[in-house]
Protein backbone atom coordinates (compact mmCIF):
# COMPACT_ATOMS: atom_id res chain seq x y z
CA UNK A 1 0.00 0.00 0.00
CA UNK A 2 1.22 3.59 -0.66
CA UNK A 3 2.62 5.39 2.34
CA UNK A 4 0.44 7.87 4.22
CA UNK A 5 0.71 11.29 2.61
CA UNK A 6 1.27 14.61 4.33
CA UNK A 7 -2.17 16.05 3.67
CA UNK A 8 -4.31 16.56 6.75
CA UNK A 9 -7.51 17.67 5.00
CA UNK A 10 -6.99 15.86 1.70
CA UNK A 11 -7.26 19.15 -0.22
CA UNK A 12 -3.53 19.76 -0.63
CA UNK A 13 -0.45 17.60 -0.90
CA UNK A 14 -0.32 14.30 -2.84
CA UNK A 15 -3.60 13.41 -4.51
CA UNK A 16 -4.90 10.01 -5.58
CA UNK A 17 -4.60 9.40 -9.34
CA UNK A 18 -4.92 6.42 -11.70
CA UNK A 19 -2.10 6.08 -14.23
CA UNK A 20 -0.72 3.71 -16.83
CA UNK A 21 2.55 2.16 -15.63
CA UNK A 22 4.09 2.96 -19.03
CA UNK A 23 3.51 6.69 -19.51
CA UNK A 24 1.41 9.68 -18.51
CA UNK A 25 -1.02 9.40 -21.46
CA UNK A 26 -3.11 6.36 -20.36
CA UNK A 27 -1.73 4.39 -23.31
CA UNK A 28 -0.14 0.92 -23.58
CA UNK A 29 2.76 -0.21 -25.82
CA UNK A 30 1.64 -2.90 -28.34
CA UNK A 31 3.93 -5.57 -26.86
CA UNK A 32 2.82 -5.12 -23.23
CA UNK A 33 -0.37 -5.98 -21.31
CA UNK A 34 -2.65 -3.14 -20.23
CA UNK A 35 -1.68 -2.10 -16.69
CA UNK A 36 -3.26 0.70 -14.65
CA UNK A 37 -2.57 1.40 -10.97
CA UNK A 38 -3.39 3.95 -8.30
CA UNK A 39 -0.69 6.28 -6.97
CA UNK A 40 -0.49 9.54 -5.07
CA UNK A 41 0.97 12.47 -6.99
CA UNK A 42 1.81 16.06 -6.05
CA UNK A 43 -0.66 18.37 -7.79
CA UNK A 44 -1.66 20.79 -4.99
CA UNK A 45 0.10 22.91 -2.37
CA UNK A 46 -0.92 25.21 0.44
CA UNK A 47 -1.15 28.87 -0.48
CA UNK A 48 2.12 30.50 0.55
CA UNK A 49 4.33 27.46 -0.06
CA UNK A 50 5.31 28.78 -3.49
CA UNK A 51 5.61 32.13 -5.19
CA UNK A 52 2.60 33.12 -7.25
CA UNK A 53 4.13 32.10 -10.61
CA UNK A 54 7.33 31.28 -12.45
CA UNK A 55 9.48 28.33 -13.57
CA UNK A 56 9.99 26.99 -10.03
CA UNK A 57 6.44 27.20 -8.68
CA UNK A 58 5.04 23.72 -9.20
CA UNK A 59 3.92 21.05 -6.74
CA UNK A 60 6.70 18.42 -6.91
CA UNK A 61 7.56 15.47 -4.65
CA UNK A 62 9.63 16.00 -1.54
CA UNK A 63 9.65 12.30 -0.59
CA UNK A 64 8.60 9.21 -2.53
CA UNK A 65 8.46 5.45 -2.33
CA UNK A 66 8.86 3.03 -5.23
CA UNK A 67 6.34 0.62 -6.77
CA UNK A 68 7.87 -2.17 -8.87
CA UNK A 69 5.89 -3.93 -11.61
CA UNK A 70 7.03 -6.84 -13.82
CA UNK A 71 5.26 -7.67 -17.10
CA UNK A 72 5.82 -10.02 -20.08
CA UNK A 73 6.15 -9.37 -23.78
CA UNK A 74 2.77 -10.63 -25.05
CA UNK A 75 3.12 -10.22 -28.83
CA UNK A 76 6.58 -11.65 -29.64
CA UNK A 77 7.49 -8.30 -31.24
CA UNK A 78 10.38 -7.84 -28.86
CA UNK A 79 11.82 -11.34 -29.34
CA UNK A 80 15.40 -11.55 -30.61
CA UNK A 81 17.02 -14.21 -32.80
CA UNK A 82 17.16 -16.62 -29.87
CA UNK A 83 13.33 -16.57 -29.70
CA UNK A 84 13.40 -16.32 -25.91
CA UNK A 85 10.44 -14.86 -24.07
CA UNK A 86 11.01 -11.31 -22.85
CA UNK A 87 10.12 -9.88 -19.44
CA UNK A 88 10.40 -6.31 -18.17
CA UNK A 89 10.50 -4.36 -14.93
CA UNK A 90 8.97 -0.89 -14.47
CA UNK A 91 9.28 1.35 -11.42
CA UNK A 92 6.71 4.03 -10.56
CA UNK A 93 7.15 6.53 -7.74
CA UNK A 94 4.39 7.12 -5.21
CA UNK A 95 4.59 10.67 -3.85
CA UNK A 96 4.38 10.83 -0.05
CA UNK A 97 5.11 14.54 0.57
CA UNK A 98 5.24 17.65 -1.62
CA UNK A 99 7.21 20.86 -1.97
CA UNK A 100 7.60 23.74 -4.39
CA UNK A 101 9.91 23.02 -7.32
CA UNK A 102 10.49 22.86 -11.06
CA UNK A 103 8.02 21.37 -13.55
CA UNK A 104 10.42 18.70 -14.81
CA UNK A 105 10.20 16.89 -11.48
CA UNK A 106 6.51 16.10 -11.99
CA UNK A 107 7.19 13.31 -14.48
CA UNK A 108 10.81 12.56 -13.60
CA UNK A 109 9.74 11.70 -10.09
CA UNK A 110 6.81 9.49 -11.17
CA UNK A 111 8.24 7.23 -13.89
CA UNK A 112 11.71 6.15 -12.83
CA UNK A 113 14.44 5.90 -15.46
CA UNK A 114 16.02 2.56 -14.58
CA UNK A 115 18.98 2.58 -17.01
CA UNK A 116 20.33 5.03 -19.55
CA UNK A 117 20.16 2.45 -22.33
CA UNK A 118 16.60 1.17 -21.85
CA UNK A 119 14.90 4.21 -20.32
CA UNK A 120 11.78 3.54 -18.26
CA UNK A 121 12.05 -0.26 -18.22
CA UNK A 122 14.61 -2.98 -17.60
CA UNK A 123 14.72 -6.42 -19.23
CA UNK A 124 14.70 -9.14 -16.57
CA UNK A 125 15.04 -12.92 -16.56
CA UNK A 126 12.14 -15.38 -16.50
CA UNK A 127 13.21 -16.46 -12.99
CA UNK A 128 13.07 -12.86 -11.74
CA UNK A 129 9.69 -12.37 -13.35
CA UNK A 130 8.20 -15.50 -11.76
CA UNK A 131 9.56 -14.50 -8.35
CA UNK A 132 8.22 -10.94 -8.48
CA UNK A 133 4.95 -10.95 -10.42
CA UNK A 134 2.87 -11.99 -7.38
CA UNK A 135 4.05 -8.78 -5.66
CA UNK A 136 2.73 -6.55 -8.45
CA UNK A 137 0.25 -3.86 -7.38
CA UNK A 138 -3.38 -4.46 -8.30
CA UNK A 139 -3.96 -4.03 -12.02
CA UNK A 140 -7.22 -2.06 -12.12
CA UNK A 141 -8.05 -3.37 -15.60
CA UNK A 142 -8.57 -6.81 -13.97
CA UNK A 143 -10.80 -5.59 -11.11
CA UNK A 144 -14.45 -6.62 -11.33
CA UNK A 145 -16.87 -3.78 -12.16
CA UNK A 146 -13.99 -1.32 -12.64
CA UNK A 147 -15.85 0.09 -15.65
CA UNK A 148 -18.61 1.26 -13.32
CA UNK A 149 -16.28 3.87 -11.82
CA UNK A 150 -14.63 6.88 -13.44
CA UNK A 151 -10.97 7.25 -12.55
CA UNK A 152 -9.26 10.35 -11.04
CA UNK A 153 -6.82 12.12 -13.34
CA UNK A 154 -5.02 15.50 -13.51
CA UNK A 155 -4.06 17.72 -16.44
CA UNK A 156 -1.50 20.52 -16.50
CA UNK A 157 -3.15 23.90 -17.13
CA UNK A 158 -2.60 25.02 -20.77
CA UNK A 159 -1.18 28.33 -19.42
CA UNK A 160 0.49 26.72 -16.41
CA UNK A 161 3.51 29.04 -16.36
CA UNK A 162 1.38 32.11 -15.54
CA UNK A 163 -1.58 30.58 -13.70
CA UNK A 164 -1.85 30.96 -9.94
CA UNK A 165 -0.73 28.02 -7.83
CA UNK A 166 -4.21 26.59 -7.11
CA UNK A 167 -4.82 25.98 -10.83
CA UNK A 168 -1.50 24.47 -11.96
CA UNK A 169 -3.27 21.12 -12.36
CA UNK A 170 -6.93 20.58 -13.22
CA UNK A 171 -8.83 17.53 -11.97
CA UNK A 172 -10.92 15.43 -14.32
CA UNK A 173 -12.54 11.99 -14.59
CA UNK A 174 -11.80 9.32 -17.16
CA UNK A 175 -13.10 5.84 -17.93
CA UNK A 176 -10.38 3.23 -18.24
CA UNK A 177 -9.43 2.35 -21.84
CA UNK A 178 -11.63 -0.53 -22.98
CA UNK A 179 -14.62 0.72 -20.98
CA UNK A 180 -17.56 2.41 -22.70
CA UNK A 181 -18.26 6.09 -22.02
CA UNK A 182 -22.03 6.21 -21.48
CA UNK A 183 -22.27 9.84 -20.42
CA UNK A 184 -19.93 12.82 -20.23
CA UNK A 185 -20.19 16.59 -19.96
CA UNK A 186 -18.15 19.58 -21.10
CA UNK A 187 -17.97 22.75 -19.05
CA UNK A 188 -15.73 25.79 -18.61
CA UNK A 189 -13.44 25.78 -15.58
CA UNK A 190 -12.77 29.25 -14.21
CA UNK A 191 -9.07 29.81 -13.46
CA UNK A 192 -6.96 32.86 -12.67
CA UNK A 193 -3.76 34.15 -14.21
CA UNK A 194 -1.23 36.18 -12.23
CA UNK A 195 -1.55 39.96 -12.87
CA UNK A 196 -5.03 39.55 -14.37
CA UNK A 197 -8.22 40.56 -12.63
CA UNK A 198 -10.58 38.62 -14.88
CA UNK A 199 -10.86 34.80 -14.85
CA UNK A 200 -9.69 32.63 -17.74
CA UNK A 201 -11.98 29.78 -18.84
CA UNK A 202 -10.54 26.36 -19.63
CA UNK A 203 -12.92 23.86 -21.33
CA UNK A 204 -13.00 20.50 -19.54
CA UNK A 205 -14.78 17.28 -20.46
CA UNK A 206 -15.58 14.83 -17.66
CA UNK A 207 -16.72 11.25 -18.08
CA UNK A 208 -19.68 10.81 -15.73
CA UNK A 209 -20.84 7.26 -16.40
CA UNK A 210 -18.99 4.21 -17.76
CA UNK A 211 -19.85 0.59 -18.41
CA UNK A 212 -18.10 -2.58 -19.56
CA UNK A 213 -18.06 -3.14 -23.32
CA UNK A 214 -20.85 -5.58 -24.27
CA UNK A 215 -20.84 -5.43 -28.06
CA UNK A 216 -23.22 -2.45 -28.32
CA UNK A 217 -22.41 0.44 -30.63
CA UNK A 218 -21.96 2.81 -27.71
CA UNK A 219 -18.89 4.97 -28.23
CA UNK A 220 -15.78 3.65 -26.45
CA UNK A 221 -13.05 5.72 -24.80
CA UNK A 222 -10.46 4.61 -27.36
CA UNK A 223 -12.38 6.50 -30.06
CA UNK A 224 -12.64 9.67 -28.00
CA UNK A 225 -10.32 12.64 -27.71
CA UNK A 226 -7.34 11.42 -25.65
CA UNK A 227 -7.14 14.81 -23.96
CA UNK A 228 -10.43 14.30 -22.09
CA UNK A 229 -10.36 15.50 -18.50
CA UNK A 230 -11.75 13.65 -15.43
CA UNK A 231 -11.63 12.95 -11.29
CA UNK A 232 -13.24 10.56 -8.81
CA UNK A 233 -13.57 10.17 -5.07
CA UNK A 234 -14.17 6.41 -5.24
CA UNK A 235 -11.37 4.42 -3.59
CA UNK A 236 -9.98 1.26 -5.16
CA UNK A 237 -7.40 -1.10 -3.64
CA UNK A 238 -3.76 -0.14 -4.14
CA UNK A 239 -0.49 -1.85 -3.26
CA UNK A 240 1.04 -5.31 -3.51
CA UNK A 241 -1.34 -8.21 -4.07
CA UNK A 242 -1.14 -11.92 -4.83
CA UNK A 243 -4.61 -11.91 -6.37
CA UNK A 244 -4.42 -14.33 -9.30
CA UNK A 245 -7.14 -12.51 -11.23
CA UNK A 246 -5.01 -9.36 -11.26
CA UNK A 247 -2.20 -11.35 -12.89
CA UNK A 248 -4.35 -13.55 -15.15
CA UNK A 249 -2.70 -12.47 -18.38
CA UNK A 250 0.71 -13.22 -16.88
CA UNK A 251 -0.23 -16.76 -15.80
CA UNK A 252 -1.74 -17.52 -19.19
CA UNK A 253 1.41 -16.29 -20.85
CA UNK A 254 3.60 -18.61 -18.72
CA UNK A 255 1.42 -21.63 -19.54
CA UNK A 256 1.09 -20.85 -23.25
CA UNK A 257 4.31 -22.71 -24.19
CA UNK A 258 3.11 -25.98 -22.66
CA UNK A 259 -0.30 -25.65 -24.28
CA UNK A 260 1.30 -25.09 -27.70
CA UNK A 261 3.54 -28.15 -27.27
CA UNK A 262 0.58 -30.34 -26.25
CA UNK A 263 -1.44 -29.17 -29.26
CA UNK A 264 1.47 -29.94 -31.60
CA UNK A 265 1.93 -33.47 -30.22
CA UNK A 266 -1.80 -34.18 -30.47
CA UNK A 267 -1.86 -32.98 -34.08
CA UNK A 268 1.15 -35.21 -34.87
CA UNK A 269 -0.59 -38.29 -33.40
CA UNK A 270 -3.80 -37.61 -35.33
CA UNK A 271 -1.87 -37.11 -38.56
CA UNK A 272 -0.02 -40.43 -38.05
CA UNK A 273 -3.31 -42.26 -37.44
CA UNK A 274 -4.75 -40.75 -40.62
CA UNK A 275 -1.78 -41.91 -42.72
CA UNK A 276 -1.95 -45.46 -41.30
CA UNK A 277 -5.68 -45.69 -41.90
CA UNK A 278 -5.27 -44.48 -45.48
CA UNK A 279 -2.71 -47.25 -46.06
CA UNK A 280 -5.07 -49.87 -44.61
CA UNK A 281 -7.89 -48.41 -46.64
CA UNK A 282 -6.07 -49.24 -49.86
CA UNK A 283 -5.88 -52.83 -48.59
CA UNK A 284 -9.63 -52.81 -47.83
CA UNK A 285 -8.98 -53.06 -44.09
CA UNK A 286 -9.09 -49.47 -42.89
CA UNK A 287 -11.86 -47.46 -41.23
CA UNK A 288 -12.19 -45.13 -44.21
CA UNK A 289 -12.78 -48.12 -46.49
CA UNK A 290 -15.60 -49.37 -44.30
CA UNK A 291 -17.12 -45.88 -44.10
CA UNK A 292 -16.84 -44.66 -47.68
CA UNK A 293 -16.15 -47.72 -49.87
CA UNK A 294 -12.69 -46.15 -50.48
CA UNK A 295 -11.89 -47.69 -53.93
CA UNK A 296 -13.69 -46.52 -57.03
CA UNK A 297 -14.04 -50.03 -58.54
CA UNK A 298 -16.22 -51.06 -55.59
CA UNK A 299 -18.95 -48.83 -57.00
CA UNK A 300 -19.42 -51.24 -59.91
CA UNK A 301 -19.75 -54.24 -57.61
CA UNK A 302 -22.22 -52.28 -55.50
CA UNK A 303 -24.35 -51.42 -58.54
CA UNK A 304 -24.34 -55.05 -59.74
CA UNK A 305 -25.46 -56.28 -56.34
CA UNK A 306 -28.24 -53.70 -56.24
CA UNK A 307 -29.47 -54.67 -59.78
CA UNK A 308 -29.50 -58.40 -58.92
CA UNK A 309 -31.45 -57.76 -55.72
CA UNK A 310 -33.99 -55.62 -57.55
CA UNK A 311 -34.58 -58.36 -60.15
CA UNK A 312 -35.16 -60.91 -57.45
CA UNK A 313 -37.69 -58.62 -55.76
CA UNK A 314 -39.58 -58.12 -59.04
CA UNK A 315 -39.65 -61.89 -59.68
CA UNK A 316 -41.16 -62.50 -56.30
Image: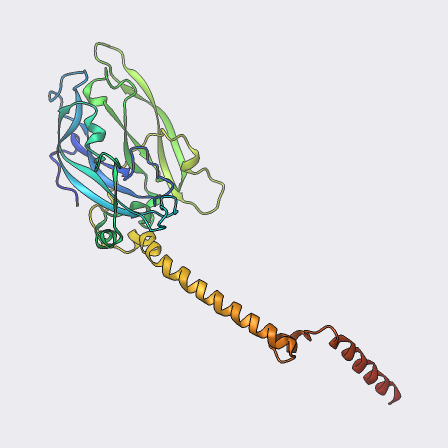
Looking at the rendered image, the quarter that the C terminus falls into is bottom right
Q: Quadrant of residue 66?
A: top left
Residue 22, percent from left and from top = 29, 38
The one of 195 and 190 positioned closer to us in this rendering: 195
Q: Residue at x 44, y 63 (%)?
A: 263
The one of 63 and 18 positioned closer to us in this rendering: 63
Position of 130 with respect to 31 (left or right) is left
The one of 118 and 99 positioned closer to us in this rendering: 118
Q: Quadrant of residue 164?
A: top left
Position of 192 with respect to 76 (left or right) is left
Looking at the picture, does residue 249 appear above or below residue 151? below
**Which residue is farthest front?**
81
Residue 158, percent from left and from top = 30, 20
The one of 47 and 127 positioned closer to us in this rendering: 127
Q: Quadrant of residue 155?
A: top left
Residue 315, percent from left and from top = 88, 88
Position of 277 with respect to 72 (left or right) is right
Looking at the picture, does residue 304 appear above or below residue 69? below
Q: Residue at x 58, y 74 (%)?
A: 277
Q: Residue at x 19, y 43 (%)?
A: 67
Looking at the picture, does residue 280 appear above or below residue 147? below
Total label count? 0
Q: Residue at x 35, y 36 (%)?
A: 27
**Which residue is farthest bottom?**
316
Residue 95, percent from left and from top = 16, 35
Amino acid sequence: MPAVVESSLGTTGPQREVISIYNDDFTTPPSRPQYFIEVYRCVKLEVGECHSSGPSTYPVPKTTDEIEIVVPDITNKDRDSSDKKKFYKYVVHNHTACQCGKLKYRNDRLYKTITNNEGLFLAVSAAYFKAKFSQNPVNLIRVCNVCNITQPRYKLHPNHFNVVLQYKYLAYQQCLPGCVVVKNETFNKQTFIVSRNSPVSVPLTNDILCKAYDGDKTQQYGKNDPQKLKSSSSEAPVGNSSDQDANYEILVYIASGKVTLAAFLLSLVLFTILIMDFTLCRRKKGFLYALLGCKSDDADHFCQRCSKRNRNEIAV
